[in-house]
Amino acid sequence: MYKIEKLTISFILFSIIYTIFNIKVGIIITLLFLFYNFFKKDYIYFIILILFYQSYINSDILEKNKIYNLKIRKIGEKIELLKINKKNPKEEYNIKIYDDINNGIFYTTSKVENKYKNIVYLENYKIKESNLNKYRYYLLKNIEKIDLEYDTESFVKAIILGEKTALDNEVKNRFNNIGTSHILVISGFHVGLIIMLLLKIGEKLKFSYKQKYFFTFIILTIYIILVMFTPSVFRAYIMGSFILFSNIFYEKNEIKKSYCLSMILLFLANPFIIKNISFQMSYIALFAIIYSYNYYVKLIENKYLKLILLSIIIQLYLMPIFLYYFKTIYILSFLVNVIILSYAVFIIPAIFILYFINLISFNILGELIKYIIEALYHSLYGIVTMFDKIPLMKIDIKYSSTWFLMLFSYFIIFLIEYELRKTIKKC
């Protein structure tokens, strides 16, 4: 096990401790751990865990009838709290205001009118829009200029800029019912496709080996800023950046190190991110790929069986999460994901390319691009609709899951893996 993997486990444990217990318990356990590692002369633990503790105390909570400087992000109907007086919030808050605002990042000086659990109502607020929103609006307006059908336009906005507000509920439900709703959000899947697309463009532009990787990194960074950071996007961006720079400096890319370092950076930015569903799903899915799929895939030669194995392992590892948060078990989504994602690998880059051709051609090719994008979307949605009609694609569970049951489920999964690997080694 790499030292960075041990360090990542330490960060996970301490994040859980600070999230569950109060500050005094967290301080005592941290001091004991640091004291132990100091005398072992393992100074990397000592230094980074102090930074982790600093990030913890650099956090705040909201109290009724007090005035705060807040940074908020609106995505769809939900307004998330990102910063309190430039500090991390210790809780996940849903902000309620009386004005209608567009999706994006905003800054406000506000008084907390009322607070019920994690729902916070603001009053006497002055809202200032982030300059980044202007660029998002520009890109969104250019999508609207293509004059696509409503459902197609909503889909294009979702996969290019993560703008899911306009998506019809029926469309979202169909994707959700077959376990492919991750296509409708910006995720590691999209970032990976964008990196491959940008590298290809760099080659076509006759960039040198290093230039094409620098070009990809710069464009990717601008894109990630525009789509607004979420844990899954940030994880994919950090890991993608490590891969790009390892190629620039001719270093061997270690995906395990990239995975661990991206998690550590997120913990240092916000120790409470471990409570975020997007963070949990993103990192558990990638854990399944790196530590489980990469072990078994060596035993299989058929590329289609490899895709099915990948889908099964990810679904297995995400099952406890789906049970806990959504009370749902997906039955056949591992097969559907293989088909849908295989198709989406071609559709999503094609839509990106067509959109930006339209952007730089000032709508000269508007009608042709409109026709192609609509054909691509309808073909994908037709496949999704076909699978949605199959009974028992998912099962809704009535009982409520608990943290203990979720952790116990992962214990069972790890136990099965352990026994399976023992059997493979004997064969």
Image (cartoon, helix red, strand yellow):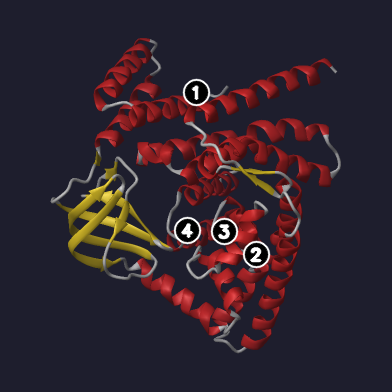
- At label 1, counting other C-alpha atoms closer than 10 Å, the crowd grade (few under 14, some 14-19, many 20 or more) is few
The answer to which of marks 2 and 1 sits earlier in the sequence is 1
> Residue at 17% of width from left, 53% of height from top?
68
Q: What's the CA distance linking mark 1 and mark 3?
A: 35 Å
Where is residue 335 drawn, in percent x and y? 76, 48
Question: Which residue has dot 1 on it?
Answer: 6
The answer to which of marks 1 and 3 sits earlier in the sequence is 1
Report the quarter where the C terminus lies.
top right
**View extreme (front): residue:** 398
Of residues 108 and 76, which is closer to you in this image?
76
**Amino acid beneath label 1:** Lys
Where is residue 199, by image quadrant? Answer: bottom right
Q: What's the CA distance linking mark 3 and mark 2?
A: 25 Å
Q: Secondary structure at mark 3?
A: helix
Question: Which residue has dot 3 on it?
Answer: 211
> Residue at 49% of width from left, 23% of height from top?
6
**Amino acid beneath label 3:** Gln
**Amino acid beneath label 4:** Ile
Q: What's the CA distance linking mark 4 and mark 1?
A: 29 Å
Question: Which residue has dot 2 on it?
Answer: 348
Viewer can see residue 21: yes
Of residues 340 and 177, which is closer to you in this image?
177
The answer to which of marks 4 and 1 sits earlier in the sequence is 1
Q: Which mark is residue 224?
A: 4
